[in-house]
Amino acid sequence: MLENANKTPLSEYGEFGLIELLTKNIKLKNQSTILGVGDDAAILNVQNRYQLVSKDLLMEGIHFDIRYYPLKHLGYKAIAVNLSDIAAMNAKPEQVLVGIAASSRYTVEAIEEIYAGMYLCCEHYGVDLVGGDTTSSVSGLCISVTVLGYAQPETIVRRSTAQTNDLVCVSGDLGGAYMGLMILEREKEVFLKDPKAQPDLDGFDYILQRQLKPEPRLDIVNKLKEKNILPTAMIDISDGLASEILHICKQSKKGCCLYEDKIPIDVQTYNTAMDFKLIPTTIALSGGEDYELLFTIKQADYDKIKDINGITIIGHITDANEGCMLITNDKKSIPIKAQGWDAYLKKT
Ligand code: ADP
Ligand code: MG
């Protein structure tokens, strides 16, 4: 019985049956959602706010490996990474639309599990799932999420507006998600060699959670608002600190000066990197998938920000001709690069 409980083929439900199954319990949470799932389109009330739109696509084999990625986490992450893009604009996400294409390898129960993770994230952040599209795929799973957010026009924060002497700030800590992935990959290799081997994930809870269940930093957006701080520029860290600070500097036509010893790295990330013979700073700079916020503020806001928990000042913005530099622990100034970590690797 239990064996079969998990094995309903998608064909048994068909497209409309599956949509009904996946969406029947939706309760709308936002005033801006006039009509959700069920008609040809959702109806939204924008009022006097600007609307922000973003989409992220997750492909099996490219963005996730279903052999070690729990389906519920996958659903949670698919929503979370989209909410993070709205957080990075200093706005509030209120609706998502979900496109899903699955091959016959996936059962109805598997898709329900993905949706359970999606709804968990939507619930946690007060977001309505208002529509989507469902189709089959010849190979693998594809999840595409579109998110809609809102903000008063004057509070929206772009990447392109950092000013010289602004302070560069980052939320949380960096590199954890990448080291979590390294642990999952290592255990996968062990399992492929010996399917009877038990995964050894003890002691890696924090970094595994950083990889499997990233959280959009909407709490930081709210804290900044409470303290009356409007960042001058902002981006979320999906590809690593180096790549993101270069985006801010390039689009703002500025340079920067970051300090290696200021970059926040959790002790579990640090120790795991050392075990893998990797340099923790390199991982924080280029690891990616941390979904923390990287932002700049006016120097005048220093007193307001210094007491907010979970925000670290890691440097400042300079004129473009000074370049984008990292001051290392041994006081060398080296250019920040998005790829090719030779400079960092050579230093030890
Ligand atoms: P159409 O033929 O007009 O594209 P569909 O039958 O695909 O309509 O969708 C019917 C309704 O169900 C629409 O409101 C659509 O947004 C919603 N929907 C379809 N697929 C999904 C999904 N995977 N998740 C959430 N809502 C969905
Ligand atoms: Mg459709």
Image (cartoon, helix red, strand yellow):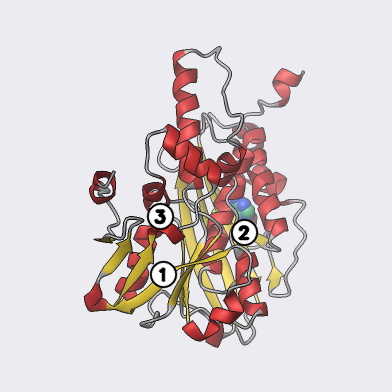
* CA neighbours of label 3 inside 10 A, class few (<14), some (14 to 19), many (20+): many
Element type where label 3 sits in the image:
loop
Q: Which amino acid is tagged 2?
A: Gly
- Residue 221 occupies which quadrant of the picture? bottom right
Nearer to us in this view, 341 or 274: 274
Point out residue 68 in the picture as x, y percentages from the top left corner. Answer: 53, 31
Element type where label 1 sits in the image:
strand
Total marks shown come to 3
Single out the mark in the foreground, 3 or 1. Answer: 1
Q: What residue sits 73% from the left and 25% below the top?
A: 5
Residue under label 1 = 315
Q: What residue sits 49% from the left and 33% below the top?
A: 183
Q: Which amino acid is tagged 1?
A: Gly
Q: What residue sits 56% from the left and 12% below the top?
A: 196
Q: Is residue 181 left or right of residue 148?
A: left
The Cα–Cα distance between marks 3 and 2, rounded to whole angstroms, is 31 Å
Q: Which amino acid is tagged 3?
A: Gly
Q: Is residue 181 above or below residue 235?
A: above
Quarter of the image with the N terminus in it: top right
The Cα–Cα distance between marks 3 and 1, rounded to whole angstroms, is 16 Å
Residue under label 3 = 240
